[in-house]
């Protein structure tokens, strides 16, 4: 028995490996990414045979895992909450058609949001899809809920959702690793069993499956009525006020009460859907007032049969956007406790300090592309070539930060750079707006959902330049391999890989160039030729693949030709390089007189030489020779 | 300095906020403290920053040693603030509780004068030029370990130096020697800067 510090996502992974998961598939996305890499880590450590893969997108991941379940194997799929949107088509049908081997869907929600496009609540998606949900409040609980989720899934033949949130995913907790043998795997009855009325159900059968699903949910609700996952804490401490809470917010509520020095009973709900309504009603009826603490939305509150004495998101007691931070939970509870005549400790007396800090101008540290990032060089060239007037649709990834270089105008959802370029061209044709459209998308995002819109755009005659920023990896989320990589999720070599160049050609694009973004002039020549292709009578869409590995992922090409640079005496501090190139290693001296290079973070890429149009940034050797 | 227990918290509880800029090693610093706590038998709960904010943005981590299961520290309740950057130290100052302490990687304190607030709240501010020390050692990236060494002199009753050393052996084996040098340089400076935290019994008298 050993105690280890592991990440919440790894605790979920450990739960999966311990519970005998056979197939785990995922598409990376913060805050979910370490779930699959955790499965890889623990399967190696515990010597388990588990198929693990980074699928091309969440829908693919979902279906690969579900098919394994249909053969009787235990399977799981993980993604961030917006990834569940991509996989929602299979999710809704999987609820109807059911499962054989245990099947767990793990979407990580992001209240805040910290790294996401929306603050959506995956529990509400589960409610809509009619899939039961476990809502863990800590890494340790998430790990053990995996076991419950598999048992429930196999008992009822239904997909089960395990819904963590950012603060659980990225919590570090000390966890005891048991040396107990992992639960016995369920491969005994493995194999696909034909059952057309279920696996290939036509609408007539779907009606029956829907009735069956409703009956399953009814029975699961009865089970949840007596589940130890729902429990009352601080029983008997008040008869005026009670709290219903779930997830990480439950722990924040307990912490807040500890700090306030006052306790009231809390009903912790670990199974928010289907809600054990009898249990909740009995608790609710004991108190004059009930406070709902759940996030990011009102899943439990919406299911209450009567909200007469309930204070939560619906009556505005709880803010309806943003994370339920300890500060918010504390101030909400302090106010409600005061109204219920419950004495509390005063909140920390540091508001003056907070106001003083807020009144102090501090640098706004917006995220920036890393020193030496090939994306920066590509955006710099794009912006130089096409200027302020062109429209720049972009996409989800590190290169969203091309915003800072004014070479990104739209960021929407995965793959939308291509469909927006397509739609903007079509709209421009109608409105007479003849602006160049230069779209950018990363390699992983292109493979995830850029191909279908590219085919659409080619076939319907759109014209724009698409720059695929190929850095050989899924960088933002921690360097997961793509279908174009030569590695698999577990570090093994891929026997075959997809060629993005061939793929683009196969979509019907006739103008395809591959360029190294470090070669500014060549890249600009390729960009010009691409734009010319969009303007020529027999032209169309042109694709430029800007290819250079992410520096953090594979710095070897950089080490081959380091180009140390220096700023010459003539630098007049005009700030052009800071704004147009924005490398974190370039900084203005405190007196504002000149720019200098931060040797601590400079990677000797030499790319900023072109960023000074006055020629004041030079290669070190060049200046010595001069 | 004093670190009187906040109301309601357990006697062994230590809440540490670590702040800095992406790339400075906030996550590593947090893990170093967390693993050390585990090694001396204290449960931990911590919260890390991942994703977009790691690309050069402000990074903050919360670490609770021996506390509850809630991963975040409320403003005004942190015992210690470790600031790898002075601006980020100032930005996150409101996390520190009355009677707590701030350790900032800086030659001369915070970028703005907060002394009246710090006095009123009895918050002790300690500057330590960890980046300069690390630069002198030849590896700028160990500034985080140097600052932890400095702070460790104040919290040795909870996280002893030799336990931190052992953790470094586990999690920083590749650059162990330089990390140990940074840790010791910081610890010695910390010992000179102030007496260690009073024990529980001392506290009752203060």
Image (cartoon, coloured by chain):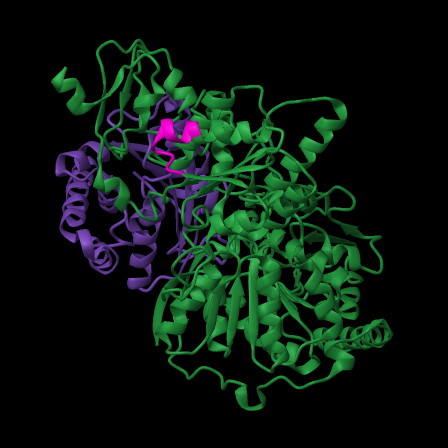
Chain colours: A green, B purple
Measuring from the top left, give residue A491's x and y in whole percent: 36, 64
Quadrant in the picture for the N terminus of chain B: top left
Q: Depth check: B188 or A597 in front?
A: A597
Quadrant in the picture for the C terminus of chain B: top left
Query: Which residue is depicted at the point 51% across and 32% down?
Result: A530
Query: Which residue is depicted at the point 73% across and 46% down?
Result: A313
How many numbered marks, from 0 up? Answer: 0
Rendered position, A198 above or below A233: below
Magenta segment, which residues? A515-525
- On the rendered structure, is A18 left or right of A431? left
Query: Which residue is depicted at the point 40% across and 77% down?
Result: A178
Q: Is residue A543 among what the camera can see?
A: yes
Q: Depth check: B92 or A365 in front?
A: A365
Rendered position, A32 above or below A204: above
Q: Does B10 appear in magenta? A: no
- On the rendered structure, is B93 left or right of A303? left
Measuring from the top left, give residue B3's x and y in whole percent: 35, 43
Q: Residue furthest bottom?
A: A188
Q: Is residue A353 among what the camera can see?
A: no
Rendered position, A219 above or below A462: below
- On the rendered structure, is A446 left or right of A297? left
Residue B126 lies in what quarter of the image? top left
Rendered position, A278 above or below B171: below
- On the rendered structure, is A250 left or right of A201? left
Measuring from the top left, give residue A8's x and y in whole percent: 47, 60
Measuring from the top left, give residue A92's x and y in whole percent: 73, 64
């Amino acid at each position: 028995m050993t105690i280890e510090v592991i990440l919440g996502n790894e605790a979920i992974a450990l739960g999966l490996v311990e519970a005998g998961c056979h197939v785990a598939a995922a598409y990376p996305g913060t805050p979910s990414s370490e779930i699959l890499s955790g499965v890889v880590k623990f399967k190696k450590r515990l010597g388990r045979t588990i198929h693990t893969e980074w699928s091309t997108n969440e829908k693919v991941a979902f279906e690969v895992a579900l098919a394994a379940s249909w053969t009787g194997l235990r399977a799981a799929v993980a993604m961030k909450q917006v990834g569940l949107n991509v996989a929602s088509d299979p999710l809704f049908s999987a609820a109807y058609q059911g499962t054989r081997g245990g099947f767990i869907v793990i979407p990580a929600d992001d209240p805040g949001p910290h790294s996401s496009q929306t603050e959506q609540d995956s529990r509400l998606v589960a409610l809509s899809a009619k899939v039961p949900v476990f809502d863990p409040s800590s890494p340790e609980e998430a790990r053990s809920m995996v076991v419950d989720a598999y048992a429930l899934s196999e008992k009822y033949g239904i997909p089960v959702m395990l819904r963590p949130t950012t603060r659980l995913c990225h919590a570090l907790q000390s966890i005891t690793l048991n040396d107990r043998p992992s639960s016995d795997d369920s491969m005994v009855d493995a194999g696909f069993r034909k059952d057309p009325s279920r696996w290939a159900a036509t609408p007539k059968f779907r009606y029956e499956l829907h009735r069956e699903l409703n009956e399953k949910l009814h029975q699961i609700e009865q089970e949840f009525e007596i589940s130890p996952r729902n429990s009352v804490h601080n029983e008997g401490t008040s008869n005026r006020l009670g709290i219903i809470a779930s997830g990480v917010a439950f722990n924040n509520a307990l912490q807040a009460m500890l700090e306030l020095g006052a306790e009231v009973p809390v009903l912790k709900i670990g199974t928010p859907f289907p809600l054990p309504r009898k249990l909740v009603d009995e608790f609710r009826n004991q108190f004059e007032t009930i406070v709902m603490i759940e996030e990011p939305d009102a899943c439990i509150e919406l299911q209450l049969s009567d909200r007469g004495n309930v204070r939560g998101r619906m009556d505005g007691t709880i803010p309806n956007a943003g994370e339920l931070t300890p500060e918010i939970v504390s101030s909400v509870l302090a106010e409600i406790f005061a109204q219920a005549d419950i004495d509390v400790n005063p909140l920390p007396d540091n508001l003056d300090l907070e106001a003083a800090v807020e009144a102090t101008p501090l640098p706004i540290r917006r995220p920036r592309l890393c020193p030496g990032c090939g994306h920066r060089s590509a955006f710099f060239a794009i912006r130089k070539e096409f200027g302020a007037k062109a429209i720049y649709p972009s996409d989800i990834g590190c290169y969203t930060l091309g915003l800072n270089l004014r070479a990104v105008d739209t960021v929407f959802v995965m793959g939308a750079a291509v469909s927006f370029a397509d739609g903007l061209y079509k709209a421009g044709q109608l409105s007479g707006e003849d602006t160049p459209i230069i779209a950018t998308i990363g390699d992983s995002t292109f493979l995830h959902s850029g191909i279908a819109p590219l085919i659409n755009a080619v076939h319907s005659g759109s014209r724009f330049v698409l720059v695929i920023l190929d850095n050989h990896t899924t960088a933002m989320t921690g360097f997961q391999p793509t279908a174009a990589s030569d590695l698999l999720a577990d570090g093994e070599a891929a026997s075959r890989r997809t060629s993005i160049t061939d793929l683009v050609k196969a979509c019907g694009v006739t103008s395809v160039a591959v360029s190294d973004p470090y070669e500014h002039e060549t890249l600009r020549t390729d960009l010009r030729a691409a734009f010319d292709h969009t303007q020529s009578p027999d032209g169309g869409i042109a694709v430029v693949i800007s290819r250079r590995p992410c520096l953090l992922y594979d710095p070897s090409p950089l080490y081959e030709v380091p180009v140390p640079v220096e700023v010459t005496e003539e630098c007049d501090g005009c700030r052009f390089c800071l704004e147009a190139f924005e490398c974190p290693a370039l900084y203005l001296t405190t007196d504002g007189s000149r720019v200098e290079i931060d040797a601590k973070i400079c990677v000797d890429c030499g790319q900023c030489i072109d960023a000074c149009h006055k020629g004041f940034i030079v290669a070190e050797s060049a200046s010595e020779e001069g | 300095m004093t670190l009187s227990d906040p109301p309601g918290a357990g006697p062994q509880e230590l809440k540490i906020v670590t702040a800095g800029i992406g790339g400075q090693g906030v996550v590593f610093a947090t893990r170093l403290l967390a693993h050390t706590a585990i090694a001396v038998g204290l449960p931990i709960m911590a919260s890390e920053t991942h994703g977009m904010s790691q690309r050069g943005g402000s990074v903050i981590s919360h670490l609770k040693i021996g506390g509850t299961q809630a991963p975040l520290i409320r403003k005004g309740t942190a015992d210690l603030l470790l600031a790898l950057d002075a601006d980020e130290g100032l930005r996150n100052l409101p996390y520190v509780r009355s009677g707590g302490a701030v350790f900032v990687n800086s030659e001369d304190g915070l970028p703005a004068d907060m002394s009246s607030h710090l006095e009123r709240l009895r918050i002790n501010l300690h500057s330590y030029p960890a980046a300069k020390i690390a630069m002198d050692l030849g590896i700028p990236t160990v500034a985080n370990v140097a600052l932890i060494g400095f702070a460790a002199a104040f919290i040795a009753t909870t996280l002893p130096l030799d336990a931190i050393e052992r953790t470094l052996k586990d999690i920083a084996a590749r650059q162990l020697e330089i990390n140990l040098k940074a840790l010791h340089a910081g610890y010695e400076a910390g010992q000179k800067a102030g007496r260690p935290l009073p024990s529980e019994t001392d506290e009752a008298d203060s």
